[in-house]
């Protein structure tokens, strides 16, 4: 069964090899950490034989790294004799994890083949493996369990988009999915619906509990220097109206820029901070902004020194950087969270909620259905389609009372759902203590 899965995975990778090569050549994607993905363990990760047990936390990308940061810190504090390692899949997640946990403790997650996974298990010898959200890799979970590690899946959710895929997987390879999930000692689901879906796809019901969403517990990030620099610049240039559009995707920027052009007619000193989701699209979006005739400033060319920067008003500030968007939401008059005007499932609206700013998102938010629906029930977010977008932006800019109500409700909604981190840490500590008791 596992041999069949490995053969199918090999066939899929071979079939899609031209795509991966093209992405490497055009955008440099997937090139970073390539040797690690094939099982080459960085020397900094290896510990002398017989010393220092470890914990392996896997967080796919930036969102999972941020959400699991408090969990990683708590594991370090409660088990100082253990070394905590963090793996990621994306390069952006890798950079953030290296900043937060130290580059010597961070590596790229290996491909789901025994030859790539086993070297890491031999080098790290984890007593506990913690997987953020829903990375159900059959070979990885099987080999980790066989090595003697306890396994926990935290902040677990089964989205509307992924549920049909799991059902198809269970139909074609029912034993494989069931055995994969049986390797997990505990599932900590975000919601009751996620718990029900986990059981539906084959997770042992007794091992699934609801702990809440870790992303509600994320604290505001430290403000990078760019925040104070832009705040001073906007104040000096009279740009009191600020629209922050984050995590945007193709086919969204054009509509957002069109809506912003309408705003400029009434607020000629307004500024849009535009933050594309993927770094490889920075140049493409910059070209679009210029082609449409907007004044543009790029973060990559921005001087923090007040004596060497120009005034910013009546145009677009392109955030072509990584890791600064969350803090820049604090400057917003209105925040728009992208990936939601097109059918891509939406992105996290909790980052702007941390600052009590009014939030607008599109009507394609399937990946964050519970969060968005909860906020909508508390009058804490405006959900719009393409047609309503310009009108909603204008209404909010003109109505301070409505903006204040939305922002205040967003912060209150977020604070009302805190506590998932404490519940998750308690479950992990109990699981690790059980694994430490001699047989």
Image (cartoon, rainbow, N blue to C red):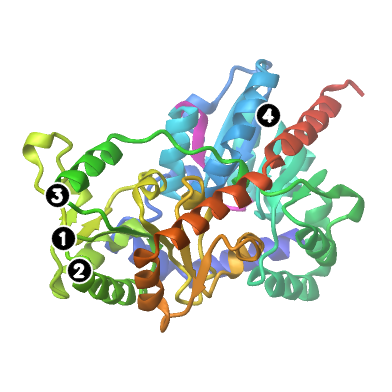
What secondary structure is found at the residue carrying circle 1?
A: strand
Q: Residues within 10 Å of mark 1 (few under 14, many from 20)?
A: some
N-term-proximal mark, 3 vs 1: 3
Compared across the picture, whether 88 is left or right of 257 comes to right
Where residue 67 sits in the image (x, y, percent)? 58, 43
CA distance for labels 3 and 2 = 21 Å
* Residue that label 2 marks: 289
Report the quarter where the C terminus lies.
Answer: top right
Residues at discs 4 and 2 in contact (Cβ within 8 Å): no
* Residue that label 1 marks: 296
N-term-proximal mark, 4 vs 1: 4
Report the quarter where the N terminus lies.
Answer: bottom right
> Quick one: which residue is furthest to the bottom in this view?
387
Where residue 337 sits in the image (x, y, percent)? 44, 62
Does residue 275 appear anywhere in the picture? Answer: yes
The residue depicted at 30 percent of the width and 63 percent of the height is 281
């Amino acid at each position: 069964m596992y041999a069949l899965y490995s053969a199918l995975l090999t066939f899929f990778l071979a079939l899609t090899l031209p795509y991966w090569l093209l992405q490497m050549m055009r955008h440099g994607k997937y090139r970073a950490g390539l040797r690690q993905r094939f099982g080459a363990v960085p020397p900094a990760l290896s510990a002398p034989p017989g010393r220092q047990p470890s914990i392996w936390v896997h967080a796919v990308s930036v969102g999972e790294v941020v959400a699991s940061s408090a969990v990683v810190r708590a594991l370090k504090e409660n088990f100082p004799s253990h070394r905590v390692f963090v793996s990621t899949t994306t390069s952006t997640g890798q950079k953030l994890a290296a900043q937060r946990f130290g580059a010597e403790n961070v590596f790229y997650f290996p491909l789901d083949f025994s030859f790539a996974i086993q070297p890491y298990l031999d080098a790290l010898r984890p007593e506990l493996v913690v997987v953020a959200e829903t990375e159900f890799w059959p070979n990885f979970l099987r080999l980790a369990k066989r090595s003697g590690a306890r396994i926990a899946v935290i902040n677990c959710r089964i989205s509307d988009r992924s549920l049909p895929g799991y059902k198809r997987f269970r139909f074609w390879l029912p034993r494989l999915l069931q055995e994969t999930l049986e390797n997990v000692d505990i599932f900590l689901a975000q919601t009751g619906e996620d718990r029900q879906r986990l059981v539906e796809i084959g997770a042992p019901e007794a091992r699934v509990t609801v702990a809440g969403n870790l992303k509600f517990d994320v604290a505001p990030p430290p403000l990078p220097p760019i925040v104070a620099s832009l705040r001073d610049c906007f104040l000096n240039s009279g740009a009191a109206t600020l629209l922050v559009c984050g995590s945007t995707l193709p086919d969204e920027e054009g509509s957002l820029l069109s809506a912003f052009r309408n705003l400029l007619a009434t607020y000629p000193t307004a500024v849009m901070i535009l933050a594309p989701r993927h770094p490889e699209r920075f140049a493409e979006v910059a070209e679009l902004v210029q082609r449409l005739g907007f004044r543009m400033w790029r973060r990559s060319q921005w001087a923090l020194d007040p004596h060497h920067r120009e005034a910013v008003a009546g145009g677009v500030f392109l955030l072509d950087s990584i890791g600064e968007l969350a803090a820049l939401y604090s400057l917003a008059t209105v925040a728009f969270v992208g990936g939601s005007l097109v059918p891509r499932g939406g992105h996290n609206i909790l980052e702007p909620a941390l600052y009590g700013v009014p939030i607008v998102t599109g009507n394609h938010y399937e990946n964050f259905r519970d969060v968005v629906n909860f906020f909508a029930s508390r009058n804490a977010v405006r959900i719009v389609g393409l047609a309503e977008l310009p009108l909603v932006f204008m209404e909010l800019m003109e109505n301070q009372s409505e903006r204040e109500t939305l922002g205040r409700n967003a912060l209150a909604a977020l604070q009302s759902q805190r506590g998932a981190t404490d519940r998750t840490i308690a479950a992990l500590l109990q699981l690790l203590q059980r694994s430490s008791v001699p047989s």
